[in-house]
Amino acid sequence: MAKTNELSKYIVAISLFIIAGSCATRKSEPITGAVVDRSDTRVANGQEKYNRYCQKCHPAGEAGLGPAVNGKPNFLKKFQAKHGLGVMPAFKDIISKQDIKDIGLYLKKLDKLKKRKDI
Amino acid sequence: MLILLCILVSHTGCYRMKKSKGGGQIGKIPPRVINAQDIALPPGYTAEYVASGLTFPSSMTFDDQGRMYVIEAGYSYGEVWLEPKLLRLENDGKFTTLATGGKNGPWTSLIFHEGYLYLSDGGAAEGGKIFRVTTDGEMKELVSGLPSIGDHHTDHLVIKDNYIYFGQGTATNSGVVGEDNMQFGWLRRQPEFHDIPCKDITLTGQNYVTDNILTEDPDDKATTGAFVPFGTSTTNGQVIKGRVPCTGSIMRIPLEGGQPEMVAWGLRNPYGLALAPNGDIYISENSYDDRGSRPIWGTGDVLWKLEPGLWYGYPDFSAGVELAGKKGFAVPGKDLVKPVMKDYPNKAPRPVAMFGVHSSTNGMDFSTNPAFGHTGEVFAAEFGDMAPGVGKVWAPVGFKVVRANVQTGVVEDFAVNKGKKNAPASMLGKGGLERPLAVKFHPSEAALYIVDFGILKMTKRGPEPQTGTGVIWKITKKR
């Protein structure tokens, strides 16, 4: 019983985390007042690869053809990019492991941008 | 593992069961409210509206005196046929009508070059035309008979080295005439029309069986292949002769007019053309839809650099990637896409940048004024999705202005509506952007103008564009 309660709490916590993340999916420059710093070459590479492979279905990380990726746990984004899920194809044979890591790094930086107070 | 599965399911939901939530899928059509404060811009920029009450505005330009000219398209998807108009904004803030067109819109592009205006007449009824127009409105036809009577039309113009370059859209979604073309309206008017390759191509003989929508018999079936009229089948190894003018291409004519010649081909709907500061020409291509006999899923709009002589991949590639046999391009729950061409003229090139699926990324212009910023980047107007007609979307796509770095391929939002989600103003109940269709930098001021087509509602019957809802916006850099 105690184990079940523990598990339920864990699921609720993760669900809340996802829902909270979902509320802050708009991260583009007009909304945050900033763009991701590209001085880190891995971040810059991640941004370019994101634009090449992911942008079309998740423009600016927001929902489009597919759901938003902004505000979602990083491990989830990496898992889905590698293995695919539902209608999203797997990219493990298209995007290299290093590029998937760099995309993750870029998205982490994007998630850290805060909404402007004047918006 | 169970937890991970729960998270994944809650994260993705079930796409197939989910209803489309496109930006045109609004209920009651609201009045067009105009409030520039509802537009979010990067710090340092400010928006204002310049003109409103326009009907289907599609393009604008400035003459050498800085006077603004705007065209109203006349025709809009939804089979609305109005009079296309060339307008000039006068000092008193009112428009003067300089010229009008017949029932052959949409007028899609307007540019100014060495004392003359040049405009493209989309040609939905009689075929595309390009005109040279004096600033008093006197029109001279430079070319006619362009193959524009299908889904897509004669598109944007640029002038380079005394030639007018223009985009010419395809007749169909992906090479095959089908029931979707009846819904567009043209198949009943032009039952013999189909896509025309610029050069000879060899087919695989892939055919598609549909109801024969050109007969009254509900049991009558039609078999249709690629690059042939509706109800015509093709065979493996069949050669389709190429000819110019062709569909899905960039062509050019001399500045004084004349016969078109092919510059590049294998493009679906090369709507936007823009001349970069270094003289290169860039193309925005509207990509495939989930509709018709050969529906294709998950293909984003594309930014290309124009390379003379090159074939860009239509109808078997998207953004340089082959469609055949890939899960990511098959409509969920349907068969994988099959090729219609047996061999290809060249290796499909790699794009410069990618835009959202169904974003309808259209008119473009390069920033060249350091006072505005982002010099060397191309700004593009995203008309926004026409879901569910083009396919299902999770959320509205487009309805904004973006900027693209042509070196890195990175696309950043530039002008979007404020709010919890990206959507047109009519859906948000606000007064910002509706459907940006073109952008134009002022020739001397640090200002970007946005041509906003206005409200276009999507219904099961098709598009319902709203007259008098078009707006011209101006974005300036604060000093």
Image (cartoon, helix red, strand yellow):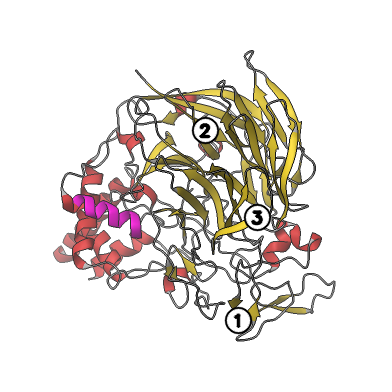
Q: Amino acid at mark 3?
A: Pro
Task: Tell me the tag on residue B206.
Answer: 1
- Magenta span of residues: A43-53
Report whether B322 appears left or right of B286: left
Disc 3 chain ID: B
* The N terminus of chain A: image quadrant: bottom left
Chain letter of mark 1 equals B
Same-subunit check for callouts 2 and 3 = yes
Left-right relation of B4 to B212: left
- Relative to B133, is B396 on the left or the right? left
Within 10 Å of the Cα at label 1, are there few (<14), some (14-19), or many (20+) other Cα atoms? some
Q: Nearer the viewer, mark 2 or mark 3?
A: 3
Q: CA distance from mark 3 to mark 1?
A: 31 Å
Is residue B390 visible from the viewing direction of this image? no
Q: Are marks 2 and 1 in contact (CB under 8 Å)?
A: no
Location of residue B276 (image quadrant): top left
* Residue type beneath disc 2: Ile
**Which percent across, then down, holds residue B464?**
68, 45
Subunit of mark 2? B
Q: Report if residue A40 lies within the magenta region.
A: no
Q: Residue at x 27, y 71 (%)?
A: A92
Front one among B361 and B197: B197
Pointer 2 local density, CA inside 10 Å: few below 14, some 14–19, many at least 20: many
The CA distance from mark 2 to mark 3 is 30 Å
Spot occupied by residue B399 in the image (x, y as percentages of width and height): 50, 42
Kind of residue sitting beneath label 1: Gln
Q: In the orientation shown, which residue stands out farthest toward the right?
A: B216
For residue B450, which numbered disc appears in the image? 2
Q: Which residue is mark 3?
A: B260
* Tag count: 3
**Looking at the image, residue B45 lies above or below residue B146:** above
Q: Main secondary structure of the magenta part?
A: helix
